Image: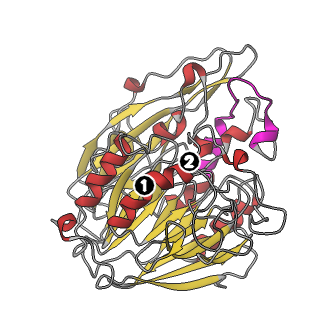
Amino acid sequence: MQWTCLTMILVFKGLLQVIGSLNKSFSLSSTHDSVWISWITGEFQIGENIKEMDPKTVGSVVKYGRWRFGMTKRAMGHSLVYSQLYPFKGLQNYTSGIIHHVRLTGLKPNTFYYYQCGDPSIPAMSDVHYFRTMPASGPRSYPGRIAIIGDLGLTYNTTSTIDHLMSNHPNLVLLIGDASYANLYLTNGTGADCYSCAFSDTPIHETYQPRWDYWGRFMQPLVSKVPLMMIEGNHEIEEQIEKKTFAAYSARFAFPSEESGSSSTFYYSFNAGGIHFVMLGGYTDYNKSGDQYQWLKKDLAKVDRKVTPWLVATWHPPWYSTYTAHYREAECMRVAMEDLLYKYGVDIVFNGHVHAYERSNRVYNYNLDPCGPVHITIGDGGNREKMAITHADEPGNCPKPSTTLDKFMGGFCAFNFTSGPASGKFCWDRQPDYSAYRESSFGHGILEVKNETHALWTWYRNQDAYGTTGDVVYIVRQPDRCPVEPDVIN
């Protein structure tokens, strides 16, 4: 039986996750004073006739402390297994090892801690690992460097992305959906270059769940040291028997959902110093009457901009992308939620899904607006579906409205524009005013918040030498020009 702390999720009332055999990592949650540790014991099973392991056979214990030889504190948690099952004869079902999640509390901000995880009663404990908590919330307190990646996968391009990212020594990593791409593979491990060409139109698409285990091992050098915060993408849907979805995503990661008042793993929030992050779900109900919208409304109303001046939102499918790939696919989500994010003064939005890089000017409802957020699409992590290279505003490239539908997002809201230079059209005939920079290259981004009003954003290409920048810009908040409404603050 293998015992290796895998993923740390920092919880600030946070999460430290340690998941999977030979994988170590951690992630954040809502505040700086707690983390979740997660790990996997035992091996996965794959075959037509398999039996789940009993989580009760192994304890979930973490020993920790501020000194390597002084880990006197102990925390206990819970464990689970998940399965990916198919109703068709001949397909290989999957069941995971035992996944453990343990929450540590009472932690000090910006402090190193050492820990071991496992079951001391056997005895079987992991090697000693360490993590550093986030700084306490405050207008002059920020993580050094926050790395942003999306649509990562497990390819040679992924390797280049992570190598470049690690050379920038981030203090926190956000993964904006689409991690392992296990659903690009049949249950026997055979893969294809894209989701649409991998499968025929069958009731349930296959996946190769061991890709999640391989992905975890690959990510270990990074996520064993740096907190990783994850939000779901379309490749995490992974349909299976009885219409179950998101089984791997929901089981393998610990999320600060409960701590942030959410009842779902699809949306949650957390603080990292003077930044409040809201992680939203594009593949769950986002309508104004739904749970996610009502949770978001309450969460944003609680944000004190004197304590966390910066407000950052993330979700997988972008609202503002000029590439033909997934063009205006998330328009219904934008129509439902954009007014709320604008009202509460969101500063930056990060998305993935489109396999390219694009940064907008401050924008609201397709118009330049000094109080709107900067939207950054960074779905260029390295997955095997290749790059998006064509733009909807180029001659002959404007998609037909009927092709923008996505069955997992629901509804159709992408109509012709009613104002501005593209009025009466479905696409602009030149690069839109709101699009500041776009490029089809694999890479990653680094966000460095300097103070209450200035943040440095840098995008790095994989093909460039380490440290060479591709796109650099200061994002400037103007709280005097764009104040949050007094009733909101109250």
At label 2, which amino acid type do we have?
A: Leu
Foreground mark, 1 or 2? 1
- Magenta segment, which residues? 195-217
At label 1, which amino acid type do we have?
A: Met
Residue at 32% over, 66% down: 344
Q: Nearer the viewer, residue 424 or 358?
A: 424
Q: Does the magenta stretch include residue 226?
A: no
Mark 1 / mark 2, whichever is N-terminal: 2
Tell me the tag on residue 8. Answer: none
Tell me the tag on residue 22. Answer: 2
Q: 10 Å neighbourhood of mark 1: few (<14), some, or many (≥20)?
A: some
From the top left corner, tell me how far across and down residue 394 is, in percent.
79, 69
From the top left corner, tell me how far across and down residue 440 is, in percent.
74, 69
| SS category of the residue bearing label 1 | helix
Residue at 68% over, 59% down: 426
Question: 416 left or right of 245?
Answer: right
How is the structure coloured here?
secondary structure
Q: 10 Å neighbourhood of mark 2: few (<14), some, or many (≥20)?
A: many
From the top left corner, tell me how far across and down residue 414 is, in percent.
61, 52
Number of labelled discs? Answer: 2
Vertically, is 196 above or below 433? above
Residue at 44% over, 47% down: 126
Q: Nearer the viewer, residue 429 or 291?
A: 429
Vertically, is 165 above or below 83? below
Identify the residue position indicated by label 1 in the image.
337
The quarter of the picture where residue 235 lies is top right
| SS category of the residue bearing label 2 | loop
The quarter of the picture where residue 361 lies is bottom right
